[in-house]
Image: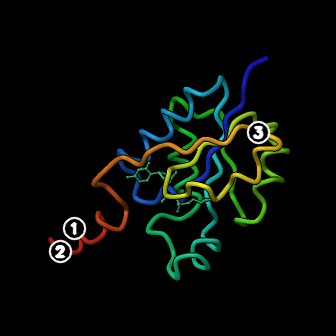
């Protein structure tokens, strides 16, 4: 049976750290589904809107070679629902989320991967603003 991998993220101001986690997530199975967080969810979580809208972020992620399917993640509380809806065998997250999704190990494998060092959307925004 082909294995489905699910991962989530905002993926705002797309950078190499985002690409690396998507590539590594894809290596855990044959089908990669990505939940891209909604603008509304970002506003709630980070108190600001992303630089790129959810439609733009979805289009970028959907165009990546390792990605088979994308959807909008409407709420952080719906992880179990999304895992079931997409029949995910593996949930992959960056280790900034380590331990946070262990409760789903009853229905899928939960894997945390190390973040790519020294790159982040926040640092990029600061760098661009300073130039
Ligand atoms: N990431 C990484 N290395 C970086 C930066 C990010 O591996 N240098 C990973 C994060 O660990 C995450 C993914 O890239 O797994 C997306 O990162 P963000 O866009 O910052 O995602 P976030 O806002 O944490 O949204 O339901 C969870 C949320 O949707 C996750």
Q: Quick check: 101 above or below 69?
A: below
- The residues tagged by marks 1 and 3 sit, at their Cα atoms, a distance apart of 39 Å
- Local crowd size for mark 2, using a 10 Å CA cut-off: few (<14), some (14–19), many (≥20): few
User: Which quarter of the rendered picture does the C terminus lie within?
Assistant: bottom left
Callout 2: helix, strand or loop?
A: helix
Asked if labels 1 and 2 touch by Cβ distance under 8 angstroms, the answer is yes
- Residue on which the image places disc 1: 127
Q: Is residue 77 left or right of residue 93?
A: right
Which quadrant of the figure has residue 110?
A: top right
Residue at position x 75%, y 33% in the image: 89
- Residue on which the image places disc 3: 108
Callout 3: helix, strand or loop?
A: loop
Instruction: Mark 3 or mark 2: name the one nearer the start of the chain.
Output: 3
- Local crowd size for mark 1, using a 10 Å CA cut-off: few (<14), some (14–19), many (≥20): few
Q: Quick check: 108 above or below 55?
A: above
Comparing 131 with 35, the one in front is 35
Callout 1: helix, strand or loop?
A: helix
- Local crowd size for mark 3, using a 10 Å CA cut-off: few (<14), some (14–19), many (≥20): many
């Amino acid at each position: 049976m082909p294995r489905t991998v699910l991962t989530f993220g905002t993926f705002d101001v797309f950078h190499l750290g985002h690409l690396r986690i998507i590539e590594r997530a894809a290596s855990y199975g044959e089908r990669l589904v990505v939940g891209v967080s909604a603008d509304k969810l970002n506003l709630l979580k980070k108190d600001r809107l992303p630089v790129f809208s959810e439609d733009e972020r979805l289009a970028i992620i959907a165009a990546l070679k390792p990605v088979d399917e994308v959807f909008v993640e409407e709420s952080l509380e719906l992880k179990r629902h999304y895992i079931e809806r997409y029949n995910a065998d593996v949930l992959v997250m960056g280790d900034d989320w380590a331990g946070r999704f262990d409760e789903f190990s009853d229905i899928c494998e939960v894997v945390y991967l190390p973040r790519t060092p020294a790159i982040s959307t926040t640092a990029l925004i600061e760098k661009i603003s300073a130039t």
